Amino acid sequence: MTVKISLSPEERNVLQQILLIQSQRAKHPITLHQLINDWARFVITVERGYEDSIYEYANDLSTRDLIQAILDKAPSRLRGKLLAWIEPWDRRFFASTKPVDKSVRSSGEGDAAPWHARVPIHLGVELEEDFRSEGIL
């Protein structure tokens, strides 16, 4: 999956600065293309049936947290362009998950994000057991 977003030089500059800050926080390089591709792959996996553990699921959700951090810092025009790429994947994620009362992430920044309180409709055995043992299901 290749992501091509047409950005002005100024928008590229702003995005570079945001990504630099996020990369420093994460202690590894982060690119927009990588984040969008990772989110898309995760969504496809959720649609097909998520087989990994709750820890992997929560970790995969953190990709969307990073995307949100970028969106929150982006000026409105840049944000709009980025949302055009993210929103279809978000819609697919929400369509292939169901809401739960308890956040999948037990603590940490971003727990209020709506994707944290959703679980795949098609659960693998391990993930279902993890959710039950954590009181999520």
Image: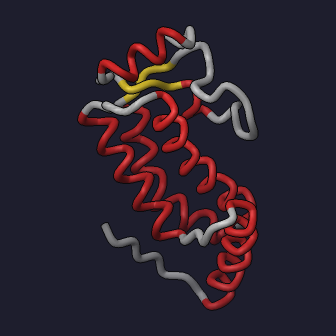
Q: Residue at x 27, y 31 (%)?
A: 49
From this view, report whether residue 30 is shown above or below residue 88.
below
| Placement of the N terminus among the 4 image quadrants | bottom left
* Picture quadrant where residue 77 is located: bottom right
Q: Position of residue 62 (x, y in %)?
A: 58, 45
* Picture quadrant where residue 120 is located: top left
Q: Residue at x 50, y 61 (%)?
A: 35
Q: Position of residue 71 (x, y in %)?
A: 66, 59
> Which residue extends farthest left?
48
* Picture quadrant where residue 80 is located: bottom right
Decide if residue 96 is on the left or right side of residue 22: left
Of residues 63 and 95, the one nearer the viewer is 63
Decide if residue 71 is on the left or right side of residue 49: right
Of residues 81 and 116, the one nearer the viewer is 116
Q: Position of residue 27 (x, y in %)?
A: 69, 65
From this view, report whether residue 127 is shown above or below residue 19.
above
Q: Position of residue 4 (x, y in %)?
A: 41, 76
Of residues 26 and 76, the one nearer the viewer is 26
Q: Residue at x 55, y 71 (%)?
A: 31
